[in-house]
Image (spheres, helix red, strand yellow):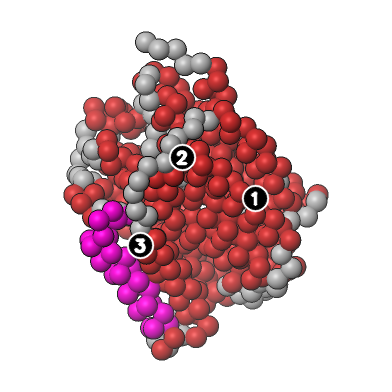
Amino acid sequence: MPTVSPRHWWALIVLAAAQFMVIMDTSIIGVALPEMQRELGFSQGELQWVFNAYVIAFGGLLLLGGRLSDLLGARKVFNAGWVVLIAGSIVAAAAQTAWVEVVGRAVQGVGGALIAPAAMTLLMMLFAHDPKELGKAMALYGAAAPAGGTAGVFLGGVFTEWLSWPWIFIIYVPIGVATLAATKLLPAVESRRGAVDVLGAASVTAGLALAVFAIVRAEHVGWGSSATVLQLGGAAALLVVFFVIQKSVRQPLMPLGIWRVPRLGSANLAMTLLGAAWIPMWYFLNLYLQQVLGYGAFASGAALLPMTVLLMIFMTAITAKLLARFGAKPLIGGGLLVLALGLLWLSAVEPTGTFAVDVLPASLVAALGMSLAYIPAMMAAMSGAPQEQAGLASGIVNTTYQVGSALGLAALTALATSQGAGQLGNLPALTDGFSAAFLGAAAVAAVGGLVTLLVMRGDGAAAAAQQASAPAAKGEQIGV
């Protein structure tokens, strides 16, 4: 059996660092949101665009990033992604107005969409020849995701409390430059001929963005207004155009035949609803801690550490063993129902609540549910895909999670605002709005759990065990 050289392990550190940073970029902004809101003039409803701009660009362009990685060479695309991410970070850090901040976050998302699939391609090139070493490499790479989520929550609090919120973006500049300097450790990949489905990527990203925009604006202009109807209709039309393009072009971004893979559809539905419940919980919990309980940025970040540490421990050490024993279906369905229970508990928050009573136990239950459901849903989506389509299946399931996150946050922000979350300084009204959002997220998670248990095909523990040995092998992303 061939021996992997130490150079390969140094290259793995570079790739794991990239995974760490891409995931941290989704979590580091959470505790800084109230400070950004005050300085940049975001309304309570508009504040979600600091998160959604990244998620829409990231999720909407992941498939294109993977295609470009195949055609242009993974190392070139990996480097280009870091250049774009650095540029977006500079714009976001220097922003003096809300719209510039949103643009910077969108550019960061484009960079992440190039980095993530290229990193997975490079990792497979480095270690695929030795299954044993591949398992070790995947374990380290997989651990980088929850570690990035944990570090983002904590570092966001440190930077915001003791420096200023722009530092949550400035930190990416030296790290990005150092990563670019280290990419000489990565294997060079020759480009190959092929077409890029630019129209497909543009239509799906524009459709998603317009749908989120319509949902956000509906609270202000009315759900039955002509503007909302036209915007939602336009979003639907763009998504129809995307599927028409995929059916008609010779080299589509997403060949529609992939949906014949067993359990791909039900697993992606579960991932969509998981993102739609989990990300709003994380978003509104940050706001509750700071705007109702009066926590500072550092204290808010520290308050979320128990939840993210539990996530990291379960995802890296426990979930894979449970998956091997019980299979994906009961873990996905059960995990979503446990998440719903935690969210239902959070919906009982009080204006005079405390962290120990109102936040800690419920957030740990929610994190347990997320830990149980996420990796099994990822593996269920890809377990039936042939090897030549594994990357495509991975890109689809990552995209559906990000799409669910964006649409769920938009819808639940509209719900929270309608119930009082826009009344800054009015603690009872704010709490009522946040409670409504938690209750809505609980309903989303419960529907996801029940549908999974009723619709998804059973997989069997043996098949799951084969997949569980390297839970990160298909490049999952988690926005914790």
Cα distance in 3D space between marks 1 and 2: 18 Å
Q: Which residues are magenta?
A: 228-253
The amino acid sitting under disc 3 is Gly
Query: Is 423 above or below relative to 349?
Result: below
Is residue 222 visible in the rendered structure shown here? Answer: yes
- Magenta highlight: main SS: helix
Residue underneath mark 1 = 86
**Residue 118 left/right relative to 463:** right
Q: Which residue is mark 3?
A: 200
Where residue 20 appears, x then y in whole percent? 57, 39
Amino acid on which the number 2 mark rests in the picture = Ala
Find residue 210 and name its label.
Answer: none
Label 1 neighbourhood size at 10 Å, few (<14), some (14-19), many (20+)? many
**Disc 2 to disc 3, C-alpha distance:** 21 Å
Rendered residue at 53%/83% (across/down) = 220
Earlier sequence position, callout 1 versus callout 2: 2
Tell me if I can see residue 354 in this picture.
no
Image height of 422 relative to 84, above or below: below
Secondary structure found at label 2: helix
In this rendering, which labeled residue sits more in front, label 1 or label 2?
2
Residue labelled with disc 2: 74
Q: Position of residue 42 (x, y in %)?
A: 66, 72
Q: Nearer the viewer, residue 438 or 197?
A: 197
